[in-house]
Image (tube, rainbow, N blue to C red):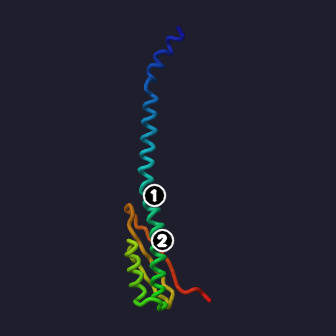
Amino acid sequence: MAGSELLPVARSERGAGSIMAVAVVAGAVVTLAALAPLSLVLQAKVATAGAADAAALAAADAAVGIVPGPPCERAGGVAAANKTALRACQVDGVIVTVRVAVTAAGFDVGATATAGPAPR
């Protein structure tokens, strides 16, 4: 009669594997949903860094006289072409420092770059 006592317990666990599978899938979906904005922000950070570098180089070219125009105006044009906003531009002789930013997934993502002639 000891075997008959185990039978009701076995019946009560019927379908437990399905519940576990649903829980695992739900956990995976929640994890991926949480990581999606992080992925967008990291991608925007890399793109913004490239935009800051390009804007600083363009501004330095103008500061040195390679291309015409005010350095910060050149930096703003390059930043806009890279779908970022120029937030700051500082010209110190022929060395230019710029800060650009963009909003990604509700976060303000920015980058700063400095460019100028190579030291001699």
> Which quarter of the picture shows residue 78?
bottom left
Amino acid type of the residue that numbered disc 2 sits on in the rendered structure: Ala
Residue at 38 percent across and 61 percent down: it is 105
Q: Which residue is identified by label 1?
A: 39
Q: Secondary structure at mark 1?
A: helix
Labelled disc at residue 102: none
Residue 115, compared with residue 26, is above or below; it is below
Residue at 53 percent across and 85 percent down: it is 116
In the image, residue 99 lies at what x, y percent?
A: 44, 77
In the image, residue 19 lies at what x, y percent?
A: 43, 32
Residues under numbered marks 1 and 2 in contact, where contact means CB atoms less than 8 Å apart: no
Amino acid type of the residue that numbered disc 1 sits on in the rendered structure: Ser
In the image, residue 20 lies at what x, y percent?
A: 46, 33
Q: Which residue is identified by label 2?
A: 49
Which is more toward the observer, 119 or 38? 119
Question: Where the C terminus falls, by quadrant?
Answer: bottom right
Q: Is residue 76 left or right of residue 95?
A: left
N-term-proximal mark, 1 vs 2: 1
Q: Secondary structure at mark 2?
A: helix
In the image, residue 96 lies at what x, y percent?
A: 48, 84
The number of numbered discs placed on residues in the rendered structure image is 2
Residue 86, compared with residue 94, is above or below; it is above
Q: Is residue 23 left or right of residue 119?
A: left
Q: CA distance from mark 1 to mark 2?
A: 16 Å
Residue at 46 percent across and 24 percent down: it is 13
Binning the other alpha carbons within 10 Å of mark 2 as few (below 14), some (14 to 19) or many (20 upward) gives some
> Which quarter of the picture shows residue 108?
bottom left
> Which quarter of the picture shows residue 72?
bottom left
